[in-house]
Amino acid sequence: MRVFAVVVAGMAAILAGPCNLPGAEPGGPSVKPAADAPDEPSTPKPRDLGPPLVDQADALRKLDRDSPVWLDPKQKEVVLLGEVCQPKYPLEFFATYPMRSYESILSVQVKPSTVHAALLALGARPGHPARLEPKFEAASGSEISIEVRWKDKDGRRQQARAQDWIRDVKTKKPMDLNWVFAGSALWRDESTGKSVYLADSAGDFISVLNLPHAMLDLPIRSAGAINARLFEVFAERLPPAHTPVTVILKPVRK
């Protein structure tokens, strides 16, 4: 229960103001986007994706009344639900909001800030998203492993690494990198005093492309130009579109 309380406190801190930044340390810099940050998107109530596919569901602690995301303090994991997309555009995300599902493997209706707070409670430390100027700096932060679980057409539970659903464009082999806890950033509207967690606004949740507000990103240069993309969906390995998927995020212990 203490860990759960830390998560709740962390979530409040992230959204409270400019001194409570993604690293949970006061006094850090806020980041202003190129244009005024939009309000958080209004999303419809998520469809029922069923229960999470975990062995000890009674150990889970719900983190958001309106979205399918939990903390497992025993296993030290964050658990959330999403559904399989059919990407029709060069891959930018492993997981993002439904409005950008055409460029993602999974569609989720969970705020990145909620997962950020839960990862903090599990001891993960955010670094920073990729920086392009004045010189490139790869995204940094604690490594986060991601596992996916789903049921096949016969109702049998299956599982895989998230990387196994992403293919290197050149080698045609599964991606061999863990994500890092980049941590996005907060921006404060000085006219209203309102703080916005930028990944919540843009849906920059679990990226495979370097994005300036990513919550989880890859620790390499992953270019944005369509003809320079490093990764594509491993379509042959994906379950059918709209299949409910349990996503498990866990800080990697060194």
Image: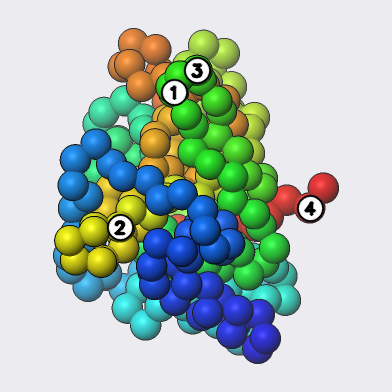
Q: Report whether residue 203 is seen.
A: no
**Residue 168, image x, y percentages:** 52, 21
Of callouts 4 and 3, the N-terminal one: 3
Depth order, front residue of 240/133: 133
Kind of residue sitting beneath label 1: Leu
Q: Locate the N terminus by quadrant.
A: bottom right
Please give the count of numbered marks on the rendered protein: 4
Q: Residue at x 47, y 72 (%)?
A: 13
**Residue 117, image x, y percentages:** 52, 67
The mark lying in front, picked from 1 and 2, is 2
Packing grade of label 2 (10 A; few <14, some 14-19, many >=20) is some
Q: Residue at x 29, y 36 (%)?
A: 103
Of callouts 3 and 2, the N-terminal one: 3
**Residues at badges 4 and 2 in contact (C-beta under 8 Å)?**
no
Of callouts 1 and 2, the N-terminal one: 1
Q: Which residue is mark 4?
A: 253
Kind of residue sitting beneath label 4: Arg
The mark lying in front, picked from 4 and 3, is 3
Looking at the image, residue 203 sits to the left or right of residue 77; the answer is left
**Residues at badges 1 and 2 in contact (C-beta under 8 Å)?**
no
Q: Residue at x 31, y 17 (%)?
A: 226
Q: Which residue is mark 3?
A: 135
Which type of secondary structure does the marked residue at label 3 adopt? loop
Q: Which residue is mark 1?
A: 132
Of callouts 1 and 4, the N-terminal one: 1
Kind of residue sitting beneath label 2: Arg
Which type of secondary structure does the marked residue at label 2 adopt? strand
Packing grade of label 3 (10 A; few <14, some 14-19, many >=20) is few
Q: Which residue is mark 2?
A: 188
